[in-house]
Image: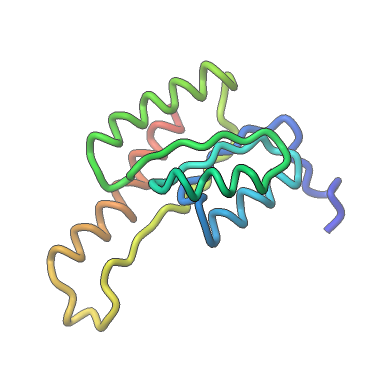
Amino acid sequence: MPQDLFCLDHKIALITGASRGIGEAIAKTLADHGAQVILASRKIDDLKRVEEDIVRQVEGIQYRPAIRERWTRSIIYFDEIRHKFKRLDILVNNAATNPFFGDVLSADEKAWDKTFAVNMKGVFFISQQAAK
C-alpha cells in the first residue's frame, strides 16, 4: 500500500501489548506510516527491543492491565501523554491474556478471573482514560 494512502503524520498512537506479536507489528506499522508511537507492556525489556527497531519517535511504558493499582497508575501515564504530546489520537487496546489452554468445561475460576481482568477490565479502564 502506498504510504500516502495511509498517512499518520503528526498522530500520537498508544499501543498496549506492544512488546511482541500483533502489538509489535501494529506499532511498527503505525510508525512506518508516520505516527509517533507510545508502546505499553508489562515487559519493559521487550519494549526496549521494539523501541530500538522503530526509527521514528517512540516511548515505552510498563503497565499491567490486570492489576487495579496499575489502572490508577495509568492515569499518570495519560497525564504524561497529555503533558508531552498534548493529545492522544489513536489507542490500540491489544494487551490480552489466555492463561488457560483447554476446553471451557475444564477452566477454573482463577483462569477466568485473570482473563476477565486483563481482557475486559483492562481494556475498559485504559479506554476510559484515553477518552478523557
What residue sits 53% from the left and 41% below the top? 39
Q: Quadrant of residue 1?
A: bottom right
Give percent across and percent down for residue 123.
Answer: 37, 47
In this view, which residue lies farthest toward the top? 83
In this view, which residue lies farthest toward the left? 109
69 to the left or right of 19: left
Render colour scheme: rainbow
What residue sits 44% from the left and 21% below the top? 79
73 to the left or right of 19: left
Q: Residue 5 or 94: which is nearer the viewer?
A: 94
Give percent across and percent down for residue 73.
Answer: 32, 29
In which quadrant of the rendered image does the C terminus lie? top left
Up-down relation of residue 104 to residue 88 (above or below):
below
Q: Quadrant of residue 31?
A: top right
What residue sits 76% from the left and 34% below the top? 9
What residue sits 52% from the left and 16% below the top? 83
